[in-house]
Image: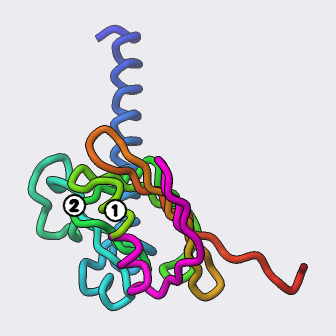
Amino acid sequence: MSQRRLKSTAATRRLVVGASLAAALALGACAPGAGFGGGGQDRAAAQGGTPIASQGGVGGQAPQAEMPPDMMSLPSLPVPPGAEVLLGDTVIIGDDETWTGQVVMTTSNYSLVQVVEFMRRQMPDYGWTETAIVRSKRTSITYVRDERFATVRIMPNQSGAEIDIVVAPLRNRSRG
């Protein structure tokens, strides 16, 4: 082989190894006890969370027996049946009970009105108290729970609704 082809092959191997390592790290983050990863429905139910299953396992193949389920849980948040979490738009920082971040989901099974009513009925079951609602093309509902707040924004999309939930700590009232 020519030297140019060898360099190209080595670069390709590094890229494949790097991608494999990134995938392994991402799957490792889904292992039980690693923040929001794995643990299945029993762990999610015990912590008041909602399990989220992805479609079709890893790479569209059936998961290996050694692998944890292709599932994550969202502690302290309800998820409409059949909703899909958009992992590229979701950012979660912290542990299961004090996390901060944004969760973005879509559903093609329900209209905006149905999703609004679902969230208004389910959030109190997870300990959240509604403080305000603004209904329009994009509905916003604000909740508080302990020392945190959640803003749930629900907007229509092409096939149903998109749900954007931001959870953050309340401002320290003693600082004024």
Which is in the foreground here, disc 2 or disc 1? 1
At 33% from the left and 70% from the top, the residue drawn is 118
Which of 25 and 81 lies nearest the eye of the viewer?
A: 81
Q: Marks 2/1: CA distance?
A: 12 Å
18 in relation to 54, above or below: above
**Which residue appears farthest toward the right when viewing the image?**
176
Residue 164 seen from this side = yes
86 in relation to 6, above or below: below
Report x, y in % for residue 153: 49, 57
At 23% from the left and 58% from the top, the residue drawn is 54
Report x, y in % for residue 150: 56, 71
154 in relation to 50, above or below: above
Q: Name the mark on residue 41.
A: none
Q: Amino acid at mark 2?
A: Gly
- Report which quarter residue 109 is drawn in: bottom left
Does the magenta segment cover residue 146? no
Q: Secondary structure at mark 2?
A: loop
Which region of the structure is painted magenta?
118-141
At 29% from the left and 53% from the top, the residue drawn is 111
- Report which quarter residue 101 is drawn in: bottom right
Q: Amino acid at mark 1?
A: Val
Which of 149 and 48 lies nearest the eye of the viewer?
A: 149
Which of 164 and 65 lies nearest the eye of the viewer?
A: 164
Identify residue for label 1: 115
Identify residue for label 2: 82
Answer with left or right where residue 77 lies relative to residue 130. Answer: left
At 25% from the left and 86% from the top, the residue drawn is 42
Residue 93 seen from this side = no
Quadrant containing the N terminus in the rendered view:
top left
Answer with left or right where residue 76 lies relative to residue 117. Answer: right
Within 10 Å of the Cα at label 1, are there few (<14), some (14-19), or many (20+) other Cα atoms?
many
Q: Secondary structure at mark 1?
A: helix
